[in-house]
Amino acid sequence: MFDIKEIIDLMISPKDKDINLISRAFSFAQKEHEGQTRDSGKPYFSHVFDVSKQLASLKMDASVISAGLLHDILEDSNIDETTLRKKFGREVTFLVKGVTKLDKYHYQGLERHAESLRKLLLAVSKDIRVLIIKITDRLHNMKTLEYVDKDKRKRIALETLEIYAPLANRLGMSEIRGELEDLAFPYVYPKKYIETKKLMKQRIVVTKKYIKKINRQLQKALVKEKMEDFTTLYRIKHLYSLYKKLPKKNMDINKIYDIYALRVIVPTVADCYRVLGIIHSQWKPLLDHIKDYIALPKPNGYQSLHTTIFTGDGGIVEIQIRTKEMHEEAQYGIATHFAYKEKKFFGGLSFKKGQKLKKKLDWMGQLIEWQKSISESGEFLESLKMDFFKDRVFIFTPKGDVIDLPEDSTSVDFAYAIHSDIGNHIYGTQINEKFSSLDTVLHSGDRVEILTRVKSKPSKKWLTHVKTALARRHINSMLAKN
Ligand code: MN
C-alpha cells in the first residue's frame, strides 16, 4: 500500500547510503506504528509517510526525510532514544528528539504560552531543520483536521494561525504559509471565512477571464521584443491573505489588484529588468506600486520585481517578475538552501549559499540572545508579538541601508533600531525629505532621516505610538533616570 519509491523519486540524485537509511527508517516506522490508526481511520503510518514525502519534495536530505518517517516514534511506541540512536545514528535521533520535545502543551492563545514558545525557539535555533519537519508535520495534520474532535480542532487551527504560519513566513516558505493559513481559516473564523469566500467567488469569475486576456497580450509583447526564454503563469491569492488585506482597502475587493497576479519567469536577473522595461513601455505603471525586491530583498530573502499596471480598459493588474531560482525560493524559502547543499559541483555556490542562509537566520539568533537577557516573560511575549509575528515594513536609512520593523512603526522605532543614542536624542524626523511628526506611521520604502540634538530627551508621549519592544524599553529606562 505504501511505496517507498514515491519518496525516493522526489529526491535529487540520492546516493546508495541515503536510500539505505530511508529504507530502514521506512520499514522500522511501518513496523512500530503497526495497528495504530489516525482519527481519519487510516493507518498511522500514512501520516509519517506523507510528512516524509513533503520533506522530500522540499529537497531535504536523507537524514531529514528519515527523521520525518520516525518523528512520532518516541511518543507513540515503546522505542526509546538509545535504541533509536543505535539504529539510526546521532543526527536522525537529534532531529526526532527535537520534534518530539515541542509537542507537550494544549494551545490556548499566545498569552498562555510564552514559555513554551521560548522553548520552541531555543530548540529550533540549534537546528532549523527541526522546525522544517515540525511545519511539515503541522501541514499534514491540518489537511486531516476535519476528523479531529471539535475542541481540539479549533485549538490546533489557532496555533497554526498564530505560531506556525508566521514561522513558515519567517523562513520564506510562503507557499506553505498560505496553505497553513487557508486550512486554519474556516476553523478559527468560520463566519469570516464564509463571507470572504463568497466575496472571492463573485470577483473571481470576472477576473479570471480578464487575466487570461492580459496574459496573452503580455506574451505577445515579450515575443515582439525578442524575448525567447520565458514562462508566464498566474496565481490566485490565498483566501486568508485576502481577508487580512480587505480592511486596509475599506473592505472594497475591487481595490485589491492582486487577486490574480501574473508572473513572468526568466533565466537571468538582467532578463527581469528587461521584461519590466517591456511591460512599462506597453502599459502605464501605478506610481507607488513598483517594487524592486531584487536589489532590495525582503528580510526573509524574498526576491522579485513587482509592478502594477493600468491595462488601458479600466483594469489594474499586478505583475511579478523573477528568475527560476527566485521563484523556487519564494515558494519554499529556506528549504531550498538545504536542497543545494549537496551540489558541490556548482563550485563556490555551496559556500555562498551558506553565508546567505546564515544571514537569513540572523533574526532568530537575535531573538534567542535577547530572550536570554530579559527576565520577565511578559516582556518577552510582548516582543514576540510585535517584533516577530507581525508583518514587517522595510525602511531606508539616508545611506540606503534597510531597517526591518513591525507594521505601524514610527520614526522613533526606526531611530532606536539604528542605535539607542540616536533614539535617545531625537529632535525631529524627515520622511521622504519632508518634515513629519514623530508619530507618523512608516510605510515600506520610506526613506527616513532622524535629526538629533544632544539636549533632546525621550518623551512619555512616545510610548503611545512606538511599536517595538526595543524602543519601549529604552524610553522607559531614560524616563526612569530623569
Ligand atoms: Mn506527527
Image (cartoon, rainbow, N blue to C red):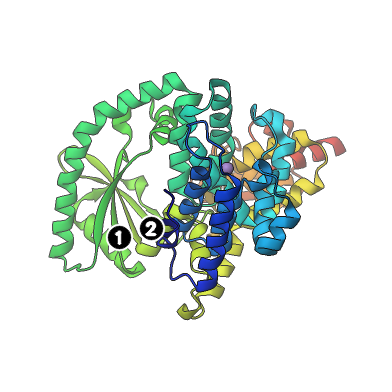
Query: Where is 200 relative to 176, above or below?
Result: above
**What mark, if any, has residue 327 been given in the picture?**
2
**What mark, if any, has residue 330 been given in the picture?**
none
Residue identified by numbered label 1: 265
Q: Amino acid at mark 2?
A: His
Badge 1 local density, few (<14 within 10 Å), some, or many (20+)? many
Query: Where is 141 relative to 415, above or below?
Result: above
Name the residue rendered at 35%, 63% in the picture.
Answer: 323
Q: Amino acid at mark 1?
A: Ile
- The image quadrant in which ligand 1 is located: top right
Query: Where is 21 relative to 473, above or below?
Result: below
Query: What separation in Å lies between label 1 and label 2 (alpha carbons)?
Result: 7 Å
Query: Where is 207 relative to 311, above or below?
Result: above
| Residue 449 visible, this angle | no
Q: Position of residue 285 (x, y in %)?
A: 27, 49
Q: Is residue 454 left or right of residue 147?
A: right
Along the line of sight, which residue is nearer the eye, 207 or 297?
207
Along the line of sight, which residue is nearer the eye, 93 or 20?
20
Write down the quadrant of residue 257 in the picture. top left
Q: Position of residue 150 (x, y in %)?
A: 53, 21
Q: Please tell me whether mark 2 sits on a helix, a strand or a loop.
A: helix
Name the residue rendered at 52%, 45% in the picture.
Answer: 45
Name the residue rendered at 68%, 51% in the picture.
Answer: 98
Q: Is residue 208 left or right of residue 121?
A: left
Do residues under tags 1 and 2 come within 8 Å of each other at their CB atoms? yes
Q: Position of residue 18 (x, y in %)?
A: 53, 68
Q: Is residue 114 left or right of residue 257?
A: right
Badge 2 local density, few (<14 within 10 Å), some, or many (20+)? some
| Residue 244 visible, this angle | yes
Q: How many marks?
A: 2
Q: Please tell me whether mark 1 sits on a helix, a strand or a loop.
A: strand
Along the line of sight, which residue is nearer the eye, 356 or 93?
93
